Image (cartoon, rainbow, N blue to C red):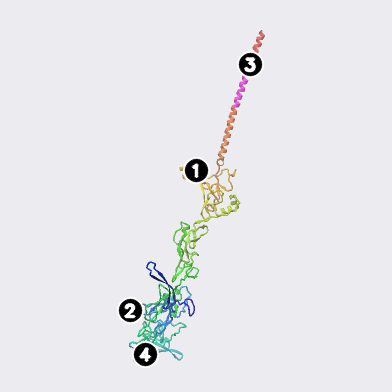
Amino acid sequence: WRDGRVGGGVPFFKKPNGLHAFKYHIYRNLYTGTLIFLSDNLFTFSGDPQMTGYTGYDCNTPICVQAERFRLNVDTSASTPGEIVPLGGHRNDGALECNSARCPEYDNMVTQNDGKSFQGGCGWDVLETGCCFEVDDGDSSAFVCLRCEELLFSAHNATCAQGALKEWKFESSAKVPLSFRSFGEILQCGPSLNPETIEGSPHSNATSATSNLFLCNVWQWEQGDYIDDADLDSLKPGRHIRVNYNNYQQNDDSPDNWVAGPEIQGEGIFECFNRGSCIAPDTCSCRDGYGGYDCATPLCRHQQATGDIVGCQNGGVCVDKDDCQCIQQVSVLWKVHTEADRGLTGWTGTDCSMPMCMQGYFDPVCNASAAPGKEGCYRCANGGICVAPDLCSCAEGWSGYDCRTPVCKAESTPLIRNQLMTSDEVKIRIFEEDPCGMSGFSSLHHEGPRGVCSLPNQCTCNCQGSYDDDLCRKIGGKYCQTPFNDPLFRERNVLAPNEIFGTRNCYSGYEGLVDGNDLFASCHLRIYEPSFYVRHTRAIVSLSIFSGIALCLLAANFWTKFTRQQRSRQKERRANSSAQSANNNMQHALAHVVKKKE
């Protein structure tokens, strides 16, 4: 019963005797005035449950109403017999166990449509096959074997000819010859059923008649009264071929409705889905890879790197034996990151344990922990691993949705804090998290990033002007300018704490910490650009000295000339004074002489 109630409820497998309920609607055509009748199929009253139990000419064949089909026996005596289909399962008693993930022994034949499965007359008999009886012979067991060497056949009988029944006695089982053995086993008289009836069956392995000629390999069984149905509703009138299968089928258009299919005559066996065996009423024994009450449920068993056996992971559906249909859908990564490829993302692998990343690539030899199915994995750039659909787990030093964004971080030591010229912890944090760009560190809105993080903990600092040898030769000018290094660094310190003399070709821009490979690990220091006086201090000083000396020399020369002129003038004045004195003396002497003469 579908709802699990014992003795009542809605049957899952029905007879085609249900009733339908309809709701009618009546409309009048406004133009013609005619009435229109429409109906809705409201519901279907469930049919009676199908009958289970045993069928076959000897009532030894179990019925499985959940079986996929009724497989007719083939006439093995025909010149061109039909196809014999072996059906597997957990042995003829359903008790075969397997502790492995996959059990190929479940595929071995349990039943098949050769007329030997379940038919009670199959076995070893005296007339046709010859067989042996085990007898007590004192302290040991002996075997008496019989075989008819000449059979007389009629329409429905076989009789051993007079004197044709031969008997042999063997003292032990070891003495029984191969002529009374099959695959090494002694042909013991009696039934040899395949499969043996399981525990709880109303039928035993014993039978009153064993005959491979008439009661085994039966593919059709003629039955019935020669005149009418003998007042038995279960029989057709007259002789007819027995029907063992009702052939009730679900209506494809309305699965709740069941219909009777064409009549199928003949003996056979019930075949569960995927070549499973019906070994008892409504009991299917399934082949490897299938389960369920009807063997229609595929099993997916996959061994992971840990040794665990799992089914379909991450919402995957087991659509066939060991075949998972994984959840995949169109990636929307490109809507956020326009450079991302377009395609399917989700899960893949035989067990759907492998995530797919559109921003990554498939590595078939991946042996990472992210490859539980040992079938490879999707990798992301720079050593990253795809850990979920379109989600990368990046290696140390990388970030971003595709692990292509390097990460640069730095530690703010006391020296660095002094160079940053701030005690603001927010700005210190900016430096530690982004030592290359330091975006937001300065209050100047026009100042852009000081550099970029080009590799993990490696910065490419911004250079606003640099020396270029080729352009210097061709153009000259600013391309010939080199970074300033103060030749007077012993006598003075022109650098602020956040400044540095350029150590490369760059004379304007930023530099910072360097690693062991002499590559920048930060860009927090501004390259010092000197003023005209600082850049040309030595020249200015030298020029000043030279100018002073020149002035001194000019002054000395002037003074010398001036003193010479003064001396010359003094001499002239002395000479003039002497001449005037002599002239005066002469005039006085003349005057005195004249006076004396007078």
Pointers 1 and 2 in contact (C-beta within 8 Å): no
Task: Classify the position of the C terminus by image quarter.
Answer: top right
Secondary structure, mark 2, is loop
Residue 169, relative to residue 521: is it above or below? below
Sooner in the amino-acid sequence: mark 4 or mark 3: 4
Give the foreground label among 4 and 3.
Answer: 4
Secondary structure, mark 4, is strand
Over which residues does the magenta segment extend? 562-585
Secondary structure, mark 3, is helix
Residue pictured at 46% horizontal, 42% vertical: 475
Q: Residues within 10 Å of mark 3 (few under 14, many from 20)?
A: few
Pointers 3 and 1 in contact (C-beta within 8 Å): no
Q: CA distance from mark 2 to mark 3?
A: 181 Å
Three-letter residue code for mark 4: Lys
In the image, 425 versus 31, the foreground residue is 31
Residue 260 in magenta stretch = no
Spot the residue most to the top. 598
Q: Which residue is mark 2?
A: 80
Three-letter residue code for mark 2: Thr
